[in-house]
Amino acid sequence: MRPIGLEALWRLWPWQLLYRREGPLSAGLRQSDSCLLGGLLPTAAHPETTTTSVCGFCSTGCGLSAHLQAGHALRLTPDPHYPVNSGRACPKGWEALAVLDSPQRALAPELRWPGKRPQKISWEAAAAHFVSRVRGLIQQHGPGSMAFLSTGQIPTEEMAFLGYFAKFTLGILHGDGNTRQCMASAVAAYKQAFGFDAPPYTYRDLEECDVIVLVGSNLCVAHPILWERVQRNRHGPRIVVIDPRFTETAAQATHHYALRPKSDLFLFYGLAREMIARGRVDEHFIAAHTHGFADFCNFLENFTWERVSRATGLSEAALTELSGILAAGQRVSFWWTMGINQGHQAVRSAQSIINLSLMLGQIGRPGTGPHSITGQCNAMGSRLFSNTTNLLGGHDFASASDRLKVSATLGIDPERIPQANGYAYDQILSAIDRGEIRGLWIVATNTAHSWIEQGRVRKLLAKLDFLVVQDMYRDTETAAFAELLLPAAGWGEKEGTFINSERRIGRVKKLRRPPGEAMSDLAIFRLLAGTWGDHDLLRRWSSPEAIFCDLARLSAGQPCDFSGLRSYSQLEACGGVQWPCPSEAQPLELPRERRLFADGRFFHPDGRARFIWEEPELPPEPSDADYPFILLTGRGSSTEWHTETRTRRSSILAKMNPAQLVVSLAASDGDALALREGDRVAVISRRARIEALAHLTHNLQSGQVFLPMHKAATNLLTQEVVDPISRQPHYKHCAVRIEKISASLL
Amino acid sequence: MLGELRREQETLPYATAVARFSSMQGGLAREGRYQELLPLAAPGPGEQYHFEVDLDLCSSCKSCVSACHQLNGTDPGESWRRVTQLESTKGPYVQALTSACHHCLDPACMKGCPVQAYEKDPFTGIVRHLDDQCIGCQYCMMTCPYDVPQYNARLGIVRKCDMCSQRLRHGEAPACAQACPTDAISIKSQSTATLKRQLSPEHGASGLPLDTVDPSMTGPTTRYKSQRPLPPLHEVKTDTQKIEPAHGPLVAMLVLSQWAVGLCLMLALLPLLEGAARPAGLMQLLATATALLTFASLGLGTLHLGRPLWAFRALLGLRTSWMSREVLAFGGFAAATLLFALIHWPELHPWAAEIGAYEDYVLGFLLLSGLGGVLCSVMIYAATRRRCWSFRRTLGRFGGTSLIMGGVSLLLALSAWLPLSPELLGLAAGTGALVALKLLSELLFLFPRAGQKDPVFVHSAALLRGPLRLWTSLRMGLGLLGGGSLLAIAYLGAQDQGIPSELLLFLSGTGLLFLLGGETIERSLFFRSVAYPRLPGAWR
């Protein structure tokens, strides 16, 4: 240690050549009080002002504070005042701006002809090309020959414009969204059971119960901020994780039941039967608010412990323990994610959970209810307003009165509204196969990575006469098939609203300029609509806020009514508003966290919820001698998001994941195959053969292997099976075999 | 219309928003809650701050890594926290492990630093890195057993976690602790005596994850706690595996400096070899070669520094750093080689006679400083306590290079200058035998005995036989060719008909080239294949 008294001497310049404690390099990391946010920030990048915006990754919908200099965001920190996350964010939220800076951003419209270099063209030329190609297709082959794939990744206003323009202006019949891949089953389950697509919860329910049942949900890595809400639960809750894998969430839980993949129906029917046997059902609630319980009881008769145990692989003792936890719970809430939604009987599986909630009377009170946690930031906006499966505002294309209402609200000719639902995602692909659909417009989704059974998908995309891809990045797997690439602004570069999992409408804001000639999706849609010649639409929906006000009016009278909201500023003042918020409500006076069904009235005309069930069926591709393993797919880690078109652009997020595809398999299976950690293996299904590094683990049961969904190779293996009701793909179960290619390099 | 849309894209709507000043104190995000993450008072005498991680609360979200990057304004990809994932080899288990600098009781980074760019704050115990003092030698990255210091190529310096000292002074929790959604990371204040006692083997409370690295090396202070039983250490999967950088400039510096020292050694032994005969031309050549090699070595070595212009600071760490000592020794050695060369170029200057009288002293000093320098080089790596770089192994390698390169270059010079003699053949045979010995020991290392328990040797050997196998083969091949040339000289020279001088010259020349290539690759493999105990877990 230097003597302190010599400090002044050391400061003299010649000494500093030899020894320098402070200087330009350490100044680069100097921090000072920003005053704005109540904490220290790097002096080199102090904000002049801040604003808040809802995050654009998952549908937790956290509030983020953007630190602005001249309106340009320098960084994001979690918003301490937002009711969803109160000052916390997951690593993706912190890094949400970093993904905007990438050399692979699409900067100008591109025409791409097979075998030629992509050719940059002007926006006028791009719009003209789009219009002439679409017009040509429709004139030659009819309105059924063009389709669009929308997304849960863009603001509600933009997807509503897309839906309006595609269906009412262009007259396209078929359009679907990528929400088909994540939420369709929960939507269908809610619609049938409750009469409307209505996740009933508020996140506070996670804090207010004594039993939390997580089914097919790795909350810790998929929705870290919701796990934080679980941690805030002061009731010492029993946390039950039902998942074939020993996940991060299972490790944190108090109880883990590793059931056989896709045996959920047996488990929940068995539990329902046991609840009846234990006399634990809420007969008053059932009698007053539900329909179909007696028949359901009869159906449950043969779901004996023995049968359930055989089907699920759980011991009868474990089943008894689990049913004891449910029976003892004062406030029991059920939460599910893709483990339920992606299956061959996904809707029924979700309903088997809803049934349990209903019969236990565990709904409508704080800390209760059957809840589906959404994936994408604006999945609910997409469901209600993308004008694909539902007519704008959760209405029905097939209902004449709904069509009249929408046409009157928007001031359009009712004849322009199609009278039937279009094709679902998988049906659009099959129609391409048949040659019926020849043109496709893909907006902000990555079909050539995410849809099931990729080998087929890529063949179909290549078969199209015309593919337009509208995306932030020019190098997505799907953009490789595009004829026309439209460069779009990303989250943080445009205005609008999202609706999160708990029905909360939140503002997303423009915090940066889009790079190059990229434009917001809304501006692109407006340009195309103008070029097509729909000036009424342009006049009516001239800004995101104008659209928002129309959407609020469209929602009037629906369960998702938010006609009480009249402007963005009002929405912001409330810190996000959950629907319902009808026109007579004073949004500012509504409680900040609300749940549905407190009065026991559901959205069916008779006000009663339905018990719905079906005989369980075995998964379509069981393992056999040739393909002895079941392939499970799912989230890799909290730093990876879907097809990684965004997260891999952040060097911070990217370095927290393995660069190569890693297949996990049970250690005992590894031993049987004479595999060692790090061996290069082939994973082979009836569809494809891919290569990966082997990771041997005790967190999987024997006979199962796991691949993260974030690498494009994974979906080459999966089998195109969809739930017959929701038409959501069955990503989480197909048969594979493992072959060793070469020994570990280490 | 397009113009209007394009203009819309250019606007930033919140540029003129009215700034709202926060009423909150002590942190960015959560009002009034950070205090729980900080000790009630700053450390008293004999105490220091340390990180505490509650493993039961950590849910693998990794926000701490992103927040460290964002709130500290580091460069792209630069974060001072990392999260790895532990699994068990015995049963279901998964646990995230977040770590940053452990602010050790006895920081190895500080001891190794040649320029005193590290200090352990006497009041808080925080190990701080002085960015402006750093010359970018990256030696701390080798001495720190936890891979904490990170090199920033843009700035040419190393940077690391300082526990957000500025925030702590401000009564604010570090970025990682602020950002943790479940409050798993906190700062505690504890007496250093207790922290030290906790690390003793019988205490066993240092927290499982730290024990993969012998905690007595540096005295890490991060404490991991958990109510749940953790699997025993030997049951935790550790699969963070990577090939280390080759450090080209260091390889050149080491091989050339050892070569120069080897030559000096040979010069000192020359009288034994050749009687008293030391032809002036030969001496001139060898002395010049020594000086050139030395200066090339030092010059190339400086290229390793991120800020080579500040290399002159490298003597500051003499008290603790072997690197400073190496710089001193080779500095003296370089000066002496210059003097020695001047002695043998009398035509260049008038005072050849005066200094020539001291030739033996100069040679003696050369030997002393040169051998000292090589020893310091050995100690630089031995002091990291990486077992692959143990004193014995490193000495064998560095010393071997010295003798081999000295021997073969002297052989080449002699064979050009003097007729074939038994001594020369002896030199060839001796050097050839050394090469064979060195290759054999390296070959044995490649195939650890079945009883080899130390995973670092097994792992290092696997790297050499696996991803590095091409280089390993090349190194072996060149070594065999070089050693073979020398043995061929010895063998042919011992025959009745002797060895033609052209062939002798050719064989010793090619031998030198082969051996130089072989030793250079050997040295790069020395760096690239180093395996050492790390914190367990993989990026997942």
Image (tube, helix red, strand yellow):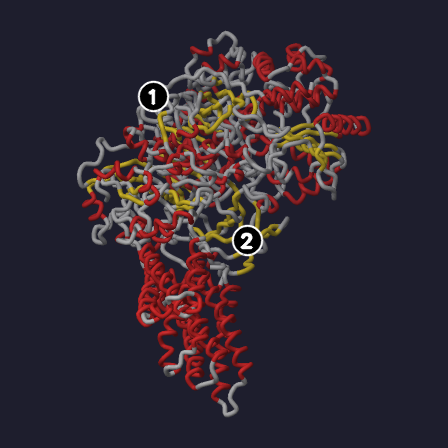
B414 shown above or below A715: below
Q: Secondary structure at mark 1?
A: loop
In space, the residues marked 1 and 2 are separated at their CA atoms by 58 Å
Q: Which residue is mark 1?
A: B24
Whether the residues at callouts 1 and 2 have beta carbons within 8 Å, the answer is no
User: What's the chain of the residue with tag 1?
Assistant: B
Q: Secondary structure at mark 2?
A: loop
Graded by Cα atoms within 10 Å as few (under 14), some (14 to 19) or many (20 or more), the crowding at tag 1 reads some
- Is residue A296 visible to us here? yes
Quarter assignment of residue B33 = top left
Judge by depth and name the residue closer to the eye, A121 or A489: A121
Residue furthest front as drawn: B350
Camera-nearest label, 1 or 2 = 1
Q: Quadrant of the N terminus of chain A?
A: top left
Judge by depth and name the residue closer to the eye, A587 or A432: A587
Graded by Cα atoms within 10 Å as few (under 14), some (14 to 19) or many (20 or more), the crowding at tag 2 reads some
Instruction: Specify whether A272 is left or right of B164.
Output: right
Residue furthest top as drawn: A584
Q: Which residue is mark 2?
A: A628
Judge if badges 1 and 2 mark residues of a common chain. no
Q: Position of residue A157 (x, y in %)?
A: 59, 20
